[in-house]
Image: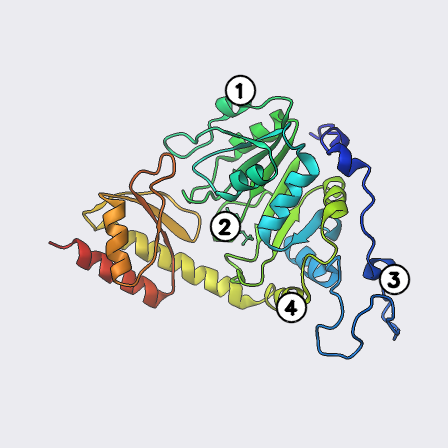
Amino acid sequence: MTRVFKINTIVRESVKGLKPYSSARDEYVSDGSEMIFLDANENPFENGVNRYPDPQQRSLKNSLAKQKGVSESKMLLGNGSDEVLDLIFRAFCEPNQDNILTLPPTYGMYKVLAGINAIENREVLLTSEFGLDVPKILATIDEKTKLIFVCSPNNPTGNVFDRQNIQKILESFNGLVVIDEAYIDFSSEESWLNKLEEYPNLIVTQTLSKAYGMAGIRLGICYASEEIITVLNKIKPPYNVNQLTQERALERIDQKMVQNEVQNILQERALLIQALQGMNFVHKIYPTEANFVLVQVDSADQRYEQLLEQGIVVRNRSSQPLCANTLRFTVGTPEENKKLIRVLNEITSP
Ligand SMILES: *Cc1c(COP(=O)(O)O)cnc(C)c1O
């Protein structure tokens, strides 16, 4: 069932009338024939990066389109998900007027970006089982609510949210629902990518920073309707994804190596969980569909320090709501995990 959703009702006034900067590389698109480029004031001597990068990242989008089954016109690439999320704020949220909804405990950047953009951040806690509190969510939104951020699998809890609950939010909300799928490749749950046609108010974000092993190149991806992507394209910096990033991403995204590494991480995750189950200071191991495990322990601060002394850095998430005395362990290499398990056994034996 396709709902009528008028994108123009939620685009900021200043963005509606905006005419984007037109770069040299936008105005003349090469058809493959040998041309002399004297249009962009570049240094003409070749060194691999003397030319401006493709502002629309066509090769990379083409490769992603094949892999994900989503057309290029439904994609926007950014300098990490962080840039993509910031663009969504700046396109749709009127500073000091609109609000967004986040669902703690969750990824901290949504709140930071709300602050940067002078947008009120309304919070509805997850349930004690880290599920979505749909009635409370629907009671908290109003006509000034533009975005709801649903991180699934969620960071730092690791779980995926019930599909029917997400669907309910998509169907009941007149703003945009941003489903952050940074960890989707570690999950047995299906991506929301193939629901873009069905829900005109759905935005799905993914990243090359986690499963693809490319946190250092900074590449985030936003998938949404053509209407939404057109708005975001208007405000993105022209050359926001640099040449080196485009090249490295293109080399790696189709490689079998990525899948092999993900499989390895999933096996290691199972081994880590198994080992944690036998440790007496571990009170609870939360179900995970990501490449990390959230664990409630007897004393998170103490265990954190003990691990540090042994050269192992984990994330203490105890300050987050519903996360008292929790540590978040990222799954490392087999060797790293072996050491983690050995050290955990040592520090907790009397
Ligand atoms: C790590 C992470 C990201 C990735 O952000 P990038 O800017 O693409 O590196 C996005 N969302 C969540 C929830 C994350 O944990």
User: Decide: marks 3, 4 in contact (CB < 8 A)?
Assistant: no
Q: Which amino acid does label 4 sit on?
A: Leu
Q: Which one is in front in this view, the residue at disc 1 or the one at disc 2?
A: 1
Task: Using the image, tell me which numbered label, if any, was put on residue 183.
Answer: 2
Secondary structure of the residue carrying numbered label 3: loop
Which residue lies under the disc numbered 4? 244
What is the count of numbered marks? 4
Q: How is the image coloured?
A: rainbow
Horizontally, is 268 left or right of 237 in the view?
Answer: left
- Identify residue for label 1: 139
- Among the two numbered marks 4 and 2 on one chain, the one whose residue lies closer to the N terminus: 2
Quadrant location of the N terminus in the rendered image: top right
- Mark 3–mark 4 Cα distance, whole angstroms, equals 22 Å
**Residue 218 location in percent, x, y?**
58, 59
Q: Residues under labels 4 and 2: Cα distance?
A: 24 Å
Q: Which mark is residue 169?
A: none
